[in-house]
Image (spheres, helix red, strand yellow):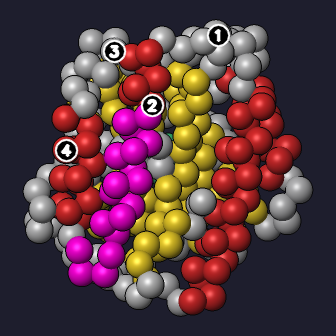
Amino acid sequence: MIEALTGDELLVMREAGKAAATALKKLRKVIKPGITTKDIENFFENFLARYPGMSAAFKGYKGYPAALCVSINEEIIHGIPAAERLVANGDLVSVDLGIKYKGLYVDTAYTYMVGKVPPQARKLVAVSLKSLLFGIKRARIGATVGDIGSCIQECVETNGFSVIRKFVGHGIGKMLHCAPEVPNFGHTGSGASLVENTAIAIEPMVSAGGYDLDILSDGWTAKTKDNSLSAHFEHTVAITKKGPWVLTA
Ligand code: MF3
Ligand code: CO
Ligand code: CO
């Protein structure tokens, strides 16, 4: 069982979460056809430099070589920014970033639609975001991770899409990843119960086709096996007496 966080610790996470949200918001204007995924990373590093004490949580994590992840179209997660990788009109660009601040972590992701995006891709993005918001509503003291996962899964599958199984959401706080696992599938009432003043990262990864995936030869990038489009949204959410508190809003 993960230990609860103090009120002060949650406030530190909220401060980092606001910075993370601001970074994702500013990226809306940065992510345009012709920029590179490395430009996205550079933007984030320059952005964070203005926040004393905050650092990119992913850099060096299990050997990950960059400050954030940028995954395009059939790439699901963990795309490594590269100076030769261009963003194009019609792309779905998923950016996942984490911030470490005063020994605490937040983690958040957003999928951007670049230029003119086909209707099916727009629907994928809308459903993925909606599934996250549904999941967040279930993040209450005493609810289970299965309550969250089943409601995300139902939202996704009733719209004809599938949830990735190999990667899941997670507890977060003094570590980037800790117990409990928060799958985007499951059954109501099953799995770990949520504890007051802990935090979890809820992060539906959704495919427009099947959920099988491959890892590219870079050792990190996960892509759909059938090359179908993928979207990813994530928030860090505290479980409080007053209900879910979205620290990365
Ligand atoms: N952001 C991923 C998550 O949401 C973890 C990325 S760690 C990295 O849990 F090392 F791959 F960057
Ligand atoms: Co993340
Ligand atoms: Co996460």
- Which quarter of the rendered picture does the N terminus lie within? bottom left
**Label ID, residue 228:** 3
- Quote the CA–CA distance across marks 2 and 4: 16 Å
Q: Write down the region rendered in magenta.
A: 126-143
Helix, strand or loop at label 4? It is: helix
Mark earlier in primary sequence (4, 1): 1
Mark earlier in primary sequence (2, 1): 1
**Label ID, residue 88:** 1
**Label ID, residue 125:** 2
Q: Residue at x 54, y 55 (%)?
A: 107
Helix, strand or loop at label 3? It is: loop
Q: Quadrant of residue 8?
A: bottom right
Residue 234: x percent and y percent? 47, 49
- Quote the CA–CA distance across marks 4 and 1: 32 Å
Q: Amino acid at mark 1?
A: Ala
Is disc 3 surrounded by few (<14), some (14 to 19) or many (20+) residues within 10 Å? some
Residues at badges 2 and 4 in contact (C-beta under 8 Å)?
A: no
Residues at badges 3 and 2 in contact (C-beta under 8 Å)?
A: no
Mark earlier in primary sequence (2, 4): 2
Magenta segment: does it hold 156? Answer: no
Residues at badges 3 and 4 in contact (C-beta under 8 Å)?
A: no
Q: Quadrant of residue 158?
A: top left
Residue 48 in sight: yes
Mark earlier in primary sequence (3, 1): 1
Q: Which residue position holds label 4?
A: 154
